[in-house]
Each structure stands twice: as C-alpha cells, then as structure tokens.
Amino acid sequence: MVTRIKICGLTRAADVEAACALGVHAVGFVCYSRSPRFVPPERLAELARAVSPLAVPVLLFVDAPEVEVRQALDIVPNALLQFHGREEASACLAWGRPFLKAVAMTEGVDLLDWESRYRGAAGLLADAPSAGFGGAGRVFDWRRLPAAAQRRLPLVLAGGLDAANVAEAIGNVRPHGVDVSSGVEESPGLKSLARMRGFVAAVRDADAQDGAA
C-alpha cells in the first residue's frame, strides 16, 4: 500500500519545488484570507508554475463566494478542490471538479454519515476540531474514525501530523493519504526542507514496514 502524501499551506515557490522533488502526491494552497497561510490570486499563478506535472495542486476554500473559486480555478484549472466550510454537497459538485470535503472530528461525528452526504466527493479529509477552520496543528482521537473496511470513500488524515507520529497514524487509521502543514513548518506558511524530508521518509518507512509484515 502506498500512502499518498499532501503538504498543505505552501506560500513560497521554493517550498513547492522542494516538496515536489521529494515526491509528494499533492501540494495545497490556502485560498482563505483569514488564514496565516493565505495565498492571494496574484501569487497563486507563481506557485502553480512551481508544481511538478506529477503532483496535484489543491485549492482550499472556506465558504468562498463563487467568484473567488472561479478566479482561483482560472489560474489553476487542473486543481483538486478542498472545502473546509459549511458547503453543501451540491455546491461542491457544481464545479465539475474532483473535491475533498473536510470533516472536523468532534465528539459524536459519524464519518460514514458524511460519506453518505458527500458521496460524490473524491474523498473525505478528517481533521481535528478547532475554534475556526482547520485542525490548528492538533491531533484528534483516531478511534473516532470507522475502520478501513467500513469506509466507502478514500480517507485523508490530517490534524497535528509530523514525522514523529505519522507512522503510528498510518498503522492505526490505514488512510488513503496523509495531510501535513504545521508539522513541517518553521513558521506559518514557511516550510522546513528538513522537516518535509523527515515526514516523507517516515511515511515511506511506514509503508515499507507494512509491506514487509
């Protein structure tokens, strides 16, 4: 099994190039102005040009007006969309693009119910609950997730992951992919090459050990 790796919250072209050189599967750009990792449209084109043709660009939105989504898609037309707000399934589907729907894993949340509501999604992204949107770099209780055999949609695991805990996360959750942001940063939006390299290596080691088991 190959666990897909997404590095999110990139704001510098050099970090995008470095992440792609490490072989990550997806790179994420935050199109939400209240985030410290916000990428305005005038910079999005520069970052998109730095994405390897073998990596998927992901555009993250939080209850964005249609004009903002359209503007970003005009700049990055091959992007996967990621919705972190209160967007209904019909609004996510309306763009005719593959999308991920983020789910804040608060107490009592049933991921299988979200699968039914967003059955047209390319996958669900399970994140830690926070006062705003996104996991704020915290790990949630992975026991809240249904077992891999019960899931119908691919699951991307987020929330406080880093090189030290991602192998444990993969072993416990068996996700389709893992999503990291603050766990590979020097400061919000500024990634550390050493931490990105360590994270990717930890994921690949976990996959290798699973394959050898």
Image (tube, helix red, strand yellow):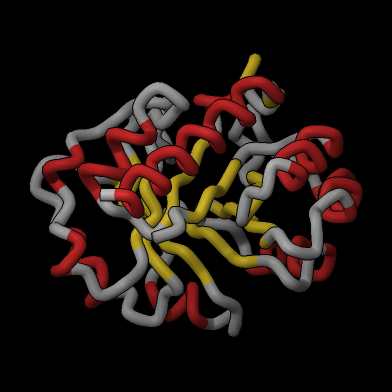
Q: What is the x, y in percent for residue 66?
A: 64, 68
Position of the N terminus, as image quadrant, is: bottom left
Name the residue nearer the viewer: 157 or 31: 157
Q: Is residue 11 left or right of residue 151?
A: right
Q: What is the x, y in percent for residue 20?
A: 74, 47
Q: Residue at x 49, y 80 (%)?
A: 93
Q: Residue at x 69, y 66 (%)?
A: 79
Q: Residue furthest left?
A: 108
Q: Is residue 129 visible in this depiction of the protein?
A: no
Q: Quadrant of residue 152?
A: bottom left
Name the residue nearer the viewer: 186 or 74: 186
Name the residue nearer the viewer: 176 or 171: 171
Q: Quadrant of residue 133?
A: top left
Is 193 located above or below residue 47 in the figure?
above
Q: Residue furthest top?
A: 186
Q: Is residue 71 left or right of residue 2?
A: right
Total count of labels: 0
Name the residue nearer the viewer: 128 or 35: 128
Q: Is residue 20 visible in this depiction of the protein?
A: yes
Q: Is residue 187 left or right of residue 117?
A: right
Q: What is the x, y in percent for residue 146?
A: 14, 57
Q: Residue at x 49, y 43 (%)?
A: 204
Q: What is the x, y in percent for residue 26?
A: 62, 54
Is 210 located above or below residue 121 in the figure?
above
Is 111 located above or below residue 191 in the figure?
below
Q: Residue at x 42, y 80 (%)?
A: 90
Q: Residue furthest front?
A: 212
